[in-house]
Every structure is written in structure tokens, then in C-alpha cells.
Amino acid sequence: MCAICAARGESFLGISSNLFILGFVASLATKLSDTFASEIGKAYGKTTFLITTLERVEPGTEGAVSAEGTAASVVGGLLVSLYGWSIGMISMKAIPVSVFAAFVATNIESVLGATLQGKKNLEWITNEVVNFINTLIGGALAIAIGRAFLSI
């Protein structure tokens, strides 16, 4: 969505195309952040906790977080954000915005996974739906922060 909005010209709906590009990069950073958190957390997480209650759970449980997975999520978000900067999509000052938005969205995704995914009468909230919401939040949050704090 952000890429389509950015392609509409200098601004669309009163939002600069540069902010939409930041949202695009942040949404991709969010997805890699979530993937790194999930896969590295499952494989190398020594102690996993349910994000909503902090009770210990098995790795791979929806909504489980670990220190290893959390650190990996930051690395994933940083990698995509740095790549976006290296090819001129975002400015250097937008990198922390993208990484922060990805990190927050990934943690919100864990909360959604723990509270909604796979619950009775909410079978339609699949992993794919939660991932869509996750990337949407990452992009929207980056746009909001960028609009508030960056002059782009």
C-alpha cells in the first residue's frame, strides 16, 4: 500500500511520498524483524515467556518471546532499514524510526498471537492475518513518527 501511495506523486492524502517510502521500508523491516524473532527465538531461545502474562512457555507458542528472539528482531529490522538507506530510499535519520516501528509492531504481533490467534470464534485470525496486521502497524507507525519528528 505504501509503495502504491508513494507512486502517486509528491504527496497523497496530504502525506509526503517520502513518508510513504519510509512506511514501505518499515513494513518490510517489520516482516524480517518478525521472522528473525520467530525463527531464531524458536531455534535458540533458552527461556521463552508468554508476552501477555510472562509465564514460561515452550518455544514456538503463539505470543512467546525470548531474549534471543527479541535481539534477533532488532537485527532483522536494522538490516532492512540499512538496506533501504543504502539504496537511497530513506535517509540516515529515518533508520531509527524504521527499526523502532518494526520492533514495536513485532511485539504487538506477539500480543495479537497470544490473545487472538487460534481462539474459539476467531478462527479467521490466522497467522497470515496477524502478519498482515503486523506489517500494517509497522508501516503506519513509521509514517506517524516520521511525520511528527522528521522533516520529510
Image (tube, rainbow, N blue to C red):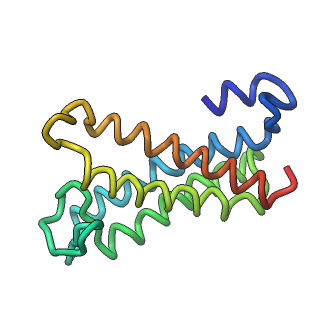
Left or right of 10? Residue 91 is left
Residue 17 relative to residue 75: left or right: right
* Residue at the spot 53% in from the left edge and 50% down from the top edge: 29
Q: Pinpoint residue 11: horizontal percent, then vertical percent.
A: 84, 31
Q: Quadrant of residue 65?
A: bottom left
- Horizontal side of 100 relative to 45 (left or right) equals right
Q: Relative to the observer, which residue lies in front, 23 or 37?
A: 23
Q: Position of residue 42 (x, y in %)?
A: 22, 62
Q: Residue 147 location in percent, x, y?
A: 77, 51
Quadrant holding the N terminus:
top right
Q: Quadrant of residue 101?
A: bottom right
Q: How many labels sit on residues? A: 0
Q: Give the quadrant of residue 91.
A: bottom right
The image shows residue 91, relative to residue 57, as above or below, that is: above
* Residue drawn at x 79%, y 37% as measured from the top left: 15
Q: In the rendered view, tell whether residue 73 sits above or below residue 6.
A: below
Using the image as rendered, state which of residue 118 and residue 44 is in the foreground.
118
Above/below status of 44 relative to 97: below
Q: Nearer the viewer, residue 122 or 103?
A: 122
Residue 119 percent coordinates (x, y): 16, 43
Q: Is residue 44 left or right of residue 27?
A: left
Residue at the image point whose x is 41% and y is 60% from the top: 107
Q: Residue at x 62, y 55 (%)?
A: 81
